[in-house]
Image (cartoon, rainbow, N blue to C red):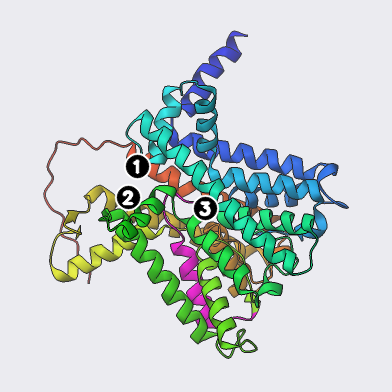
Amino acid sequence: MNLIQSLKNYKFDFLIKSPEKILPLTFFALCFLGAILLFMPFSHKGDINFIDALFTSTSAVCVTGLSVFDITKSLNGFGQFILLVLVQTGGLGIMSISSIVFILLGKRMSLSHEKTARNIFDAESKEEIKESIILIFKYTFLLEFIGAVILSICFLTEGKNIFEALSLGFFSAISAFCNAGFFLNSNNLIDYNDFGIVLYTISFLIILGGLSPMLSVMIYNVFKKKKLPPVGVIVLWATVSLLVLGSLFFMISEYHGILGNMNIIEKFNNSWFQSASARTAGFNSVDLSKINTGTYILMIFLMIVGGSPGGTAGGIKTTTFTVLLLCAYNSFLGRKNIIRNRRIKPKTIQNAITLICVYFSVLILLILMLLTTQTSGDKELIFEAVSALGTVGLSMGITSELDEVGKTIIIIGMFLGRTMPATLICYLNGKNYQNKLVYPDAKISLT
């Protein structure tokens, strides 16, 4: 008894007090629990093995959307419901859900819980944590409900009965807002690529889910003619630029390709949709196995950049990418790193560089492992690795061809893609560099 108590006091206390440990641990626990539930006979039709259940659960919790089997054929209604709960839980985040429980029960958070929440929600006080979490839940459920109503009406007009339309509408809205990419149709959204309202509803849910509620409120203030803070400016311009430029490039690149049989309006609708989806969501309205090389490179780039911090998106984040662009821009102009008369903190730049270095190191390692162990095409495997680490969920059709080793590699990629950026930033923010020694400058040539 004393041994158990001492282990509890040492190990678990050590883990809980560290924000950089509690996030991946709770996500791992949820992935494993989801795998057990999906593996149970009451969740699926026929037989599925545990590695496939774990793959699907991890994909749902990490809001990715990759799947080694057809969820419409392999999972029954209850299994699809479990999948949706995993997507919603993963999208909202473990800390958000646990914190809202404390708020509803009127209980106080532990010091370790509060410390973790402050790091994740970028809040300075308990009141700010509470306001942030309540805003996240209101924002999430309101937009998901509005999206679900619109989509349900669309599916109803397509000839589905009221129950099917509502089920598909709510499933699609939650999956889209959480940037998961799961859709209850074997061809994903290819059968709806001529239905503009469906494409735009899902794409705007993807975009709004990829923004944090706080950033969305900041951007909404533009319409009230209020001045945006620097982070709002970065997110707004990065998001709009990537969406518009991505759409135009996709349309030009695939005008006579996979978009060749569509009219001009459908070409634009699907180009916009794929530009929005490629950043993190994983829905596809066209057959991505037939895209040309230019489009392939565009989608790799969009998947790596991802969405914005605080939202459900993956990738290195628009803020990280933009901070480095601003550093280069200011360097060309020969001035300090500033934006809107504000200086970018050196620690922010250092964190951005660290995040990108770690991200690309992991990505290269995943690609090398897949190329070494799998027999699918190199181009397809690289796309799969980028999609997994970016928690995007797009595929060129080889996910079901992966063997157990390949599935395990992708599981690790999806898990790291969801937990690594936030964990790394929590770790870096918790470091205090108080070295009082002043060292001479090192002369390092870059040419």
Q: Looking at the image, do the residues carrying marks 3 and 1 touch, with CB atoms under 8 Å apart?
A: no
| Residue displayed at 72% across by 43% down | 35
Q: Mark 3 and mark 1: span between their CA atoms?
A: 17 Å
Badge 1: how crowded within 10 Å, few (<14), some, or many (20+)?
Answer: some
Q: Earlier in the sequence, mark 1 or mark 2?
A: 2
Which residue in the rendered view is the most extreme toward the top? 2
Amino acid marked by disc 3:
Gly
What residue sits right under mark 3 in the picture?
417
- Kind of element beneath mark 3: helix
| Residue displayed at 75% across by 66% down | 186
**What is the x, y in percent for residue 413?**
57, 54
Q: Nearer the viewer, residue 177 or 49?
A: 177
Q: Quadrant of the C terminus?
A: bottom left
What residue sits right under mark 1 in the picture?
428
Q: Nearer the viewer, residue 162 or 29?
A: 162
Amino acid marked by disc 1:
Leu
Magenta-drawn stretch contains 301: yes
Quarter of the image for residue 92 reads top right
Q: Mark 2 and mark 3: span between their CA atoms?
A: 17 Å
- Residue 240 left/right relative to 144: left
Q: Looking at the image, do the residues carrying marks 1 and 2 touch, with CB atoms under 8 Å apart?
A: yes
Is residue 101 placed above or below 9 in the rendered structure? below
Quarter of the image for residue 1 reads top right
What residue sits right under mark 2 in the picture?
351
Magenta-drawn stretch contains 428: no
| Numbered range of the magenta stretch | 290-312
**What is the x, y in percent for residue 137?**
52, 42
Q: Mark 1 and mark 2: span between their CA atoms?
A: 7 Å
